Amino acid sequence: MKINCVWEHNGNDSILYANNFVGAFTRGTSKEEAIRKMPEEIRRFQLWRNGTPLDEYDIEIVQEKASDLQIKDADSDVLFISEEKPLHVEEYQYLKALALKSAGDFHALYSAFPDKHKSAIPYRKTFYGPVPRTAEEMYQHTKNVNEYYFSEIGAQADNEGTIVSCRARGFETLEAIEEYLSLEAVTGSCDELWTVRKVLRRFIWHDRIHAKAMYRMGIRTFGADAIPDIFGFAR
């Protein structure tokens, strides 16, 4: 199977996004490292979304974005060429369901932690401040992009309640916008371009980044038997 990828990079630091598996990604200190990781990422991603992995994947880079952002800290502003297209309702419903499944699984992972304020990983600071260390910090950080992402495309949203409930309300306000599936790309904060497709991808991608960090922190802090592998990172 051919995996069309978008490569975003800053110097040697790279993020590779699977264009046809929305939300799947790899990172590396080089393009080659990110490419090597992609088949395993796709296999795990397909298992997570109840798909059937294949034996071989052909990785092809279809778009490149050189960025001034801190790619190594998962900062990103790329808009895929494919994300400029309008959405068909069936595709929107599929991606919305995947974004809500991702939120639900993230909440379940967070809820499984025996102590949400304990962490064995060291303090680290990035361009946006301290890296979330505990399950509580990771959960709040991931949940609280809800208002930001939806507002970039003109949908009113908030960060109240669980990650699932505030995301679901955000989709309701988006769907109240006339012809929301055909909204053109808009320039949001920091001069970043956004579309409905990009918001859907960013939710799943952002969940996956922090779910992986939370899971790894959890097994390091509490042991592998204490934290469920809901996203299949260890399969």
Image: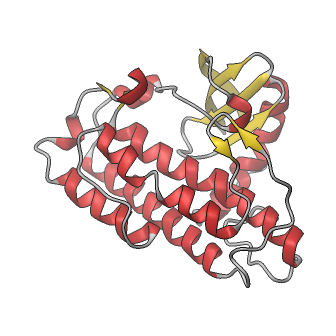
Quadrant that contains the C terminus: bottom right
Q: Quadrant of residue 17?
A: top right
Q: Furthest-left residue in view?
A: 178
* Residue 11 on image: x %, y %: 76, 15
Q: Quadrant of residue 30?
A: top right
* Residue 146 on image: x %, y %: 40, 54
Q: Is residue 127 above or below residue 10?
A: below
* Residue 222 on image: x %, y %: 85, 78
Which of 231 and 222 lies nearest the eye of the viewer? Answer: 222
Q: Is residue 10 above or below residue 201?
A: above
* Residue 145 on image: x %, y %: 46, 51
Q: How many marks?
A: 0
Which of 130 and 87 lies nearest the eye of the viewer? Answer: 130
Q: Is residue 31 above or below residue 164?
A: above
Which of 206 and 51 lies nearest the eye of the viewer? Answer: 206
Is residue 57 among what the camera can see? no
Quadrant that contains the N terminus: top right
Write the residue at 70% across / 19% down. 10
In the rendered structure, the answer to whether residue 207 lies left or right of residue 57 reads left
Write the residue at 57% across / 55% down. 207
Q: How is the image coloured?
A: secondary structure
In the rendered structure, the answer to whether residue 142 lies left or right of residue 136 reads left
Write the residue at 54% across / 57% down. 142
Write the residue at 84% across / 28% down. 29
Is residue 20 among what the camera can see? yes
In the rendered structure, the answer to whether residue 108 lies left or right of residue 99 reads right
